[in-house]
Image (tube, rainbow, N blue to C red):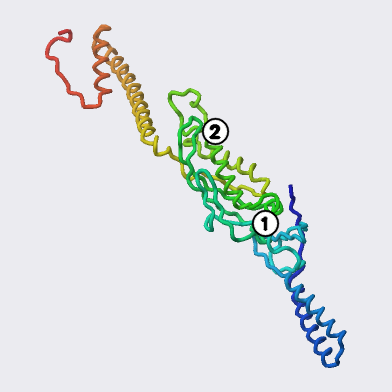
Amino acid sequence: MSKEVQIKAANGWGMLAAVIVGYIASALLFLVGISQGNVLLIIAAAVLFTATVIATGGFFTLQPGQARVCVLFGDYKGTVRDEGFHWANPFYARSLGTSSAVPSAGVKVGEDSIEVNAGSSHGSKVSTRARTYNGDRIKVNDKMGNPIEIATVVVWRVVDTAKAVFDVDDYESYVYTVTETALRHVASIYSYDHMEDDDALSGDTITLRTNIEEVSEALRIELDRRLEMAGVDVVDARLTHLAYAPEIAQAMLRRQQAEAIIAARKKIVEGAVSMVDMALDKLAEGGTVEMDDERKAIMASNLMVVLCGDSEAQPVVNTGSLYN
């Protein structure tokens, strides 16, 4: 694997002055040679002018967050990271790598493939700024085999320009492809949500819906590991969309509604039992009302019906004896 080596480039302003002097000197030599008929001065002027023209091609500028990869006839010489106006060997390659594309310029990430429209080439300048890739929604199966739709946004930047340029064919499309692959992998090792009838998924088990932070961190670590060979560091990765696939969304919604109803009923029954127990204890205190076990059971049954019923209870007044 390649490894970035930082080098320093000459100050561009000093070389600009030297180039201007070279142009002036070559013009003066040419005029003197013509006036005197001296062929040697004319040849010297031509050589000086040619060297000055070649030296002019060595100027370049770097903004903050940019780096230039210097390659001389296929040999990597180093990377310049200092911003400003610089001059370097004019024979350093101006174009490196193969086709480069960004999502807005022709990258289409689908469910099963990625298409890259070639056309422009990587220049020798590489951006080291943080960049954001907002992935499309993809359909995957979670740990339980349920089809879900999921999407992510990834913040990444190049930290090793040598790896980015030389160790992968196109580091930008590589990031996009690996992001989709890693997202599919992470989504497949977690379940969408807890299932009440599955003990293996209860307790502290991580799920996609209830543990967004943990899943996002797992995705970031997975991407960081896979993109290391491209010299890319993943700053952050977050899920931007998570839902059941349309074909099972309605069924899962009904299941969630049923689970919610069961949970609510359970809470109502627990509260009703507590209230019935408290009512019987209060009635029995101080001998206010004395009831045998059968009458206690009847009263408990009536109170449970009143407390657990969906509709409002209709009271019935007993005008006779308690035992009639």
Please state the horizontal and vertical placement of residue 320, each as a whole percent of the image. 12, 11
Residue holding disc 1: 97
Please determine whether, in this image, residue 280 is positioned above or below residue 130: above
Q: Quadrant of residue 86?
A: bottom right
**Label 2: element kind:** loop
> Which sits in the foreground, 320 or 256?
256
Mark 1 or mark 2, earlier in chain: 1
Please determine whether, in this image, residue 224 is positioned above or below residue 320: below
Residue occupying image coordinates x 32% and y 16%: 277
Local packing at callout 1 (Cα closer than 10 Å; few below 14, some 14-19, many 20+) is some
**Label 1: element kind:** strand
Q: Is residue 234 visible?
A: yes
Please state the horizontal and vertical placement of residue 166, each as a whole percent of the image. 70, 52
Q: Give amino acid for label 2.
A: Ile
Q: Give amino acid for label 1.
A: Gly
Point out the residue furthest to the bottom here.
35
Left or right, residue 30 beside residue 217: right
Please determine whether, in this image, residue 12 is positioned above or below residue 193: below
Say which quadrant the C terminus sits in. top left
Point out the residue furthest to the left here.
319
> Which sits in the foreground, 35 or 199?
35
Residue occupying image coordinates x 48% and y 22%: 199
Please state the horizontal and vertical placement of residue 10, each as a whole percent of the image. 77, 67
Please determine whether, in this image, residue 168 is positioned above or below residue 145: below
Please state the horizontal and vertical placement of residue 84, each as a whole percent of the image. 69, 67
Residue holding disc 2: 189
- Proximity of marks 1 and 2: CB atoms separated by less than 8 Å: no
